[in-house]
Image (tube, rainbow, N blue to C red):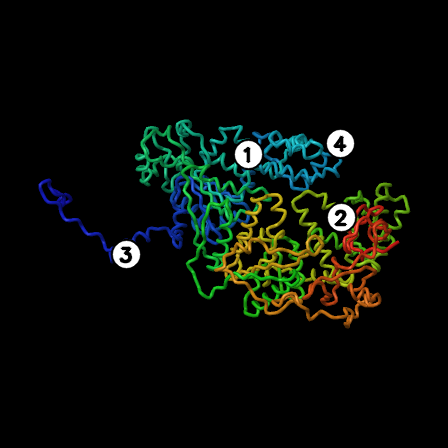
Amino acid sequence: MSKGFDDIPFFDEEPAPRKPAPAANGIAARAMAARDNAKRPDYLSGLNPEQTEAVETLEGPVLVLAGAGTGKTRVLTTRIAHILSTGRAFPSQILAVTFTNKAAREMKERIGVLVGHAVEGMPWLGTFHSIGVKLLRRHAELVGLRSDFTILDTDDVVRLIKQLIQAEGLDDKRWPAKQFAGMIDTWKNKGLDPSQIPEGDARAFANGKGRELYAAYQNRLLTLNACDFGDLLLHPIRMFRANPDVLREYHDKFRYILVDEYQDTNTAQYMWLRLLAQRPQGKSWSQRNPSPTPPHKGEGQVRAADSRSPSQSSEEQASNLDDRNAAARQDSPSPLWGGVGEGKSQGAGDRKPTVNICCVGDDDQSIYGWRGAEVDNILRFEKDFPGAKVIKLERNYRSTEHILGAAAHLIAHNEGRLGKTLFTERTNPDDEKVHVHAAWDSEEEARAIGEEIEQLQRQKHNLNDIAILVRASFQMREFEDRFVTLGLNYRVIGGPRFYERLEIRDAMAYFRLVCQPADDLAFERIVNTPKRGLGDTTVRTLHDYARARDIPMLAAATEIIETDELKPKARKALFDVVTDFRRWQTLLETTPHTELAEQILDESGYTAMWQADKSAEAPGRLENLKELIRSMEAFESMRGFLEHVALVMDAEQNEDMDAVSIMTLHSAKGLEFDTVFLPGWEEGLFPHQRALDEGGRAGLEEERRLAYVGITRAKRRCHIWFVSNRRIHGLWQSTMPSRFLDELPIDHVEVAEQDVSYGGYGRGGYGQSGFDKADPFENSYQTPGWKRAQQHRSEATRDNWGTRSGHAVERIGYGESGPRTRMIEGELVAKSTTSEPSRFNIGDRVFHLKFGNGNIAAIEGNKLTINFDRAGQKRVLEGFVERV
């Protein structure tokens, strides 16, 4: 008898005693563990248990909820490397979708490090739009295009829509093409063609012609053999719905689908993925179609779940799948939907298909709802893919315990979330808590943050590791000016610096030309901005005329409008431009420069141009223009302000230099810094009022997710700031602290005490400032503006801060017994309240420098409601009018 059976007892023998298992920490157990670890691929080393599970769970739908700083990119790239190295699919059978080209390049590079040249064979790794282009190039004829179709940029789209609006006999100024382009983009992001858009949306443009214009636009694109970016998703959706055979081809092609940043998908992207990932129920694909082409030799051992016979049970299939050598002899790797059965014996034709899709995302970081992202896509993943496995990555490798605790407590107030709590195993009792600071106004906020950064710099901290994250771009200007004053290097990420923005450069060009009529570069920039019908031909004629006579272009315009060189329409438009600049130049020395700047932007039509613009950027541009006007208040004149900006712009923007990063919270996603400053946590700014008005509770929750993103950018230090007064829409307003501040946990937050009292507003309340003086004119200023103020001084001006260029101005600040005089560095601030009776009566005839003559209709304190002859009813301070 073979010795192999010596230890098997006969039925009449006592069973042998059970062999003892190796001791838990014994030599044998450790040796076996070392053996098993030696078999693990190198790319799996260093992964924590949750990351390993996410990488190795390759069958069925998987949702990886990856919190901030938990290594989601590593999980995604390692998962692809694992699929390739185990031979479960060829590189060309993996669909991996990201949101940006940068993310796609980074993913490809990381995979290449793990598996080598195999990554070069991944043609389906890219963004939604780049993969959409590949699909359309292959099947262009199915959507009415040729394979050499053109992709139009935004300018081309607007120009085409403008032609269609004009062809319909509509006024393209009342119905701007740019506005309709935005509406079309919104519809396409929702996956809607002209026949599907809601009736209300269709009637909201061009007197109810929205649907017809959309259809005409789509037809025109087909005629031009062109498509826009929205079509790169919309056309494949239509193609897959109308051609099931083509859809089945891609069902068979893609064994695995992986999606990054799933929480940021919009409706069209969601529909696109659903069509590719979800399979028809019932009859198995292998019963309808022959097996795919077998792999070439040398491709490695592959899993073949779908090479089963129709009568195989789930257990038999599982047994076959575990035999790698047997799998290598099968026809092909398993299709995306062809995984292991559901645990009971049944025919393949009755089995529900399994989808090998893995979506990685974080519902707590869905912050792009304003551009169409739907957080509900990730929230309903388990409903869309029943039986999906949800793996939570909660182990954070970035931030301290206090930062994570504050962020987790804040985001827990959101109702629409799947739920996870970040934690770190690296605890240090010396870690700083999240600091919350209060400032009097935005200037103090910028000054204090600048000083804190200087202190960090003295402690040898790199400026590259420091970031200021703002809710709105107009907040950046205060910090940019402060850093220039301090000599701190800075860079603006995700957009141009404040004074480099389009709207700011345009406004500055107007101001430059008023102050310096010979500035031809400024003239060329704004002569046809906004559109006045002065095209390239007119500008070229002006340029040639000016060069021939060696005079500035504005002077040339003055002369040429007296001739017949130009067509009547262009001559009239140019006459208006010249007249405007003549008037503004006469006001330069007599009108406060901030008021003149606002008047220039209004009378030129520049402000109205952005008010009529319905794009998503327009409100931000208007806020920036108001911030520009506000920033001029710190300067004596318009010329002084322009000189300051020239010095600011001269600061070189060097990407390699050590510099503080300034950006919006939306631009900060995916980045991390040792120290993060979060200014502007006030109601109306953060959470932003527009988000609350347009989105309600959903808008509030997205704002809270944005706050969560901001806090989790910090690795070691996080400073949150709010102010009591901020200039909003050109007016000083008292602000309320953000509701998010009270949602932070006390255990992880420290309220910062100010060591000094900025401007007299420190821990002692609103007491007298060291800058306050009994007589505001007792100082040594020698500037022209201050001399003018002294010339106009009187008892009334001493009580009400004097006059400036003939206009009363006022102060803010409260002492121990109510309103009181206050001056900071000679800056005059308008007074809006008084207990004294008005010196005017209802019905009085008055004059206002900007609005002209009018009659007083109502009086409230020192505020007058006046019916102006030309400007209509306005509410102004009595100090700005005089009796006629």
Mark 4 vs 3, N-terminal side: 3
Looking at the image, is 522 positioned above or below residue 63?
A: below
Q: Kindly identify the residue that appears in the image at 54 percent across and 69 percent down.
A: 460
Residue at disc 2, secondary structure: helix
Cβ atoms at labels 1 and 3 below 8 Å apart: no
Give the residue number, with chain letter if any, for mark 2: 606
Between tags 4 and 3, which lies in front? 4
Give the residue number, with chain letter if any, for mark 4: 169
Residue 181, percent from left and from top: 66, 39
Mark 1 vs 3, N-terminal side: 3
Q: What is the C-alpha distance between the residues marked 2 and 3?
A: 76 Å
Amino acid beneath label 2: Tyr
Mark 1 vs 2, N-terminal side: 1
Instruction: Give whichever of 172, 598 is nearer the camera.
Output: 598
Amino acid beneath label 1: Pro
Residue 660, percent from left and from top: 59, 61
> Could you classify mark 4 by the number of other residues whose Cα lies within 10 Å: few (under 14), some (14-19), or many (20 or more)?
few
What's the mark number on residue 236?
1
What's the mark number on residue 30?
3
Residue at disc 1, secondary structure: helix
Instruction: Give whichever of 782, 237 is nearer the camera.
Output: 782
Mark 1 vs 4, N-terminal side: 4
Between tags 1 and 2, which lies in front? 2
- Farthest residue in the left direction? 12
Q: What is the C-alpha distance between the residues marked 1 and 3?
A: 54 Å
Looking at the image, is 220 positioned above or below residue 438?
A: above
